[in-house]
Amino acid sequence: MRPVIRVYLYDENGERVFGEGPCRLLHGVEELGSLKKAAEGMGMAYTKALAMLHRAEQALGFSLTEKTIGGKGGGGSRLTPQAKEFLEKYETYRDTCYAADAAIYHKIFQK
């Protein structure tokens, strides 16, 4: 057996606004330079990805991506500096939760 936990962030109304889905999506945007390509890479509809980011942005109070419109090289998206900082904090929090959970599990079940 092994423990499995999920780490989500909720708004004041109890609505889930951030977790592994948005985290992976933002990393995809950073890697691919496009929200559409990041969503496709996850097998997610672009409209769902857009709604997911919008919900997170509303709860966080800042933009997660900056968009560029068309042009010669085409449009795209990139992470805002605030998004990069938030991602780093979220991942540190998530990884700390995983480590604490593993330690607690070991203490209780692996005596």
Image: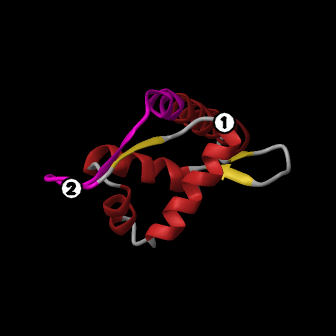
Farthest right residue in view: 13
Name the N-terminal-most of marks 1 and 2. Answer: 1
- Asked whether residue 63 is drawn in magenta, I would say no
Q: CA distance from mark 1 to mark 2?
A: 28 Å
| Label 1 residue SS | loop
- Amino acid identity at mark 1: Gly
- Nearer the observer: mark 1 or 2; the answer is 2
The residue closer to the viewer here, 96 or 73, is: 73
- Asked whether residue 86 is drawn in magenta, I would say yes
- As drawn, 2 above or below 65: below
- As drawn, 98 above or below 14: above
Q: Which residue is mark 1?
A: 61
Q: How many marks?
A: 2
Left or right of 28 in this view: 89: right
Instruction: Name the spot of residue 92 as percent of width and height, x first.
Output: 53, 29
Q: Which residues are magenta?
A: 70-88
Left or right of 86 in this view: 6: right
- As drawn, 56 above or below 97: below
Point 58% across, 38% down: residue: 94
The residue closer to the viewer here, 87 or 100, is: 87
Point 49% across, 47% down: residue: 23
Q: Which residue is mark 2?
A: 74
Point 44% across, 51% down: residue: 24
Instruction: Name the spot of residue 14 as percent of width and height, x first.
Output: 83, 51
Q: Where, by quadrant of the figure, is residue 89 drawn? A: top right
How would you rate the neighbour count of disc 1 (Cα within 10 Å): few for under 14, some for 14-19, many for 20 or more?
Answer: few
Q: Where, by quadrant of the figure, is residue 12 drawn? A: top right
The residue closer to the viewer here, 85 or 59, is: 59
